[in-house]
Image (tube, helix red, strand yellow):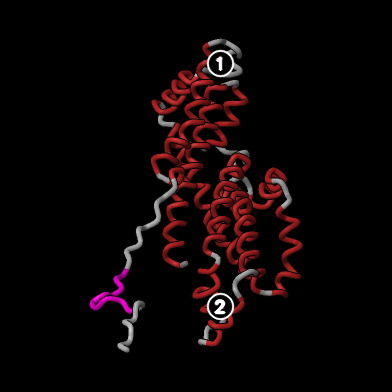
Amino acid sequence: MVGASNTSQEPAGSVDEPRLVAPPTRAWHDRRAVRLLGGALLPVGLLVAWQLVTAAEVFSPVQLPAPGAVLDAAQGLIERDLLWQHVHISTQRVLVGFAIGAAIGTALGALVGLSRVADVLLAPTIGALRAVPSLAWVPLLILWLKIGEDSKLTLIAIGATFPVFTTVSLALRHVDRQLVEAARAFGLRGLRLFTTVQLPAVIPSLFSGLRLALAQSWLFLVAAELIASSQGLGYLLIESQNNGRTDRLLLAIVLLAVIGKLSDALLGIVERWAVRRWT
């Protein structure tokens, strides 16, 4: 009897070909155009509501000026070459104070996150200082550093330090121990181990802390510019309140919101680059 042919045998010349996998499609809410348009809906809606409320005279012009009055106030400051001076000096103060605070927060966070001794000795005190309100530092800084730029930058740096410290110290405690031991097996120790393995492992957490610190820096700016300032958006805010210029007061608030968001967006671009580079 002739053996039956093997039905499971593939036909000659049949070769498995690699399958092309289509790249994953982005969800509709992750598309850039959708996010831009969606993010603009609420501000536009608030602007329209603001115009309608003022047109209906629900509030007096002193209580709530119309958007056009705020634009006129901005135009008046621009014509006197004052608006960009306020924006420039405030932005400079925030960026310098933020850079100093971020560096200190990263260093302290690394120390506490990597050393149990430092955790025991430093963490309780830093946690207590973190709870001190920003305005509580003002009299002490005036006493120590007088009323110049040093006191203002120091206050902003204080505000930027704590978010970075908290996120970095907590993230370093949860770095994969097997990853660290493998790096040590290859001879990495101390600073090389930190910069090569541990710091890249906490890059997302580090940038979360940096973005919180940047927002905190803008919050502390107003308190910093209470220290005998003659320029800056915080000064414009307080000076407008004292003079009853609600239009300029609202202008300062809008500028703080817009510039704060733009600076956060720029830091977000750096974050995406860093995540791609080191993770």
The one of 60 and 15 positioned closer to us in this rendering: 15
Gap between marks 2 and 1 measured at Cα: 59 Å
The one of 87 and 178 positioned closer to us in this rendering: 178
Q: Residue furthest bottom?
A: 1
Dot 1 amino acid type: Val
Q: Residue drawn at (51%, 42%), measured in percent from left and top?
A: 260
Q: Which residue is mark 2?
A: 179
Q: Residue furthest left?
A: 13
Residue 90, horizontal then vertical, whole percent? 51, 42
Q: Which mark is residue 132?
A: none
Question: In the rendered view, does 230 fall on the left or right side of 72?
Answer: right
Q: Which residue is mark 1?
A: 53
Q: Secondary structure at mark 1?
A: helix
Q: Residue drawn at (56%, 44%), measured in percent from left and top?
A: 218
Q: Residue furthest front?
A: 1
Q: Residue drawn at (53%, 20%), measured in percent from left and top?
A: 49
Dot 2 amino acid type: Leu
- Crowdedness near tag 2: few (<14), some (14–19) or many (≥20) residues, C-alpha within 10 Å: few
Quadrant in the rendering for residue 173: bottom right
> Which image quarter holds the N terminus?
bottom left
Q: Which residues are magenta?
A: 9-18
- Crowdedness near tag 1: few (<14), some (14–19) or many (≥20) residues, C-alpha within 10 Å: some
The one of 209 and 221 positioned closer to us in this rendering: 209
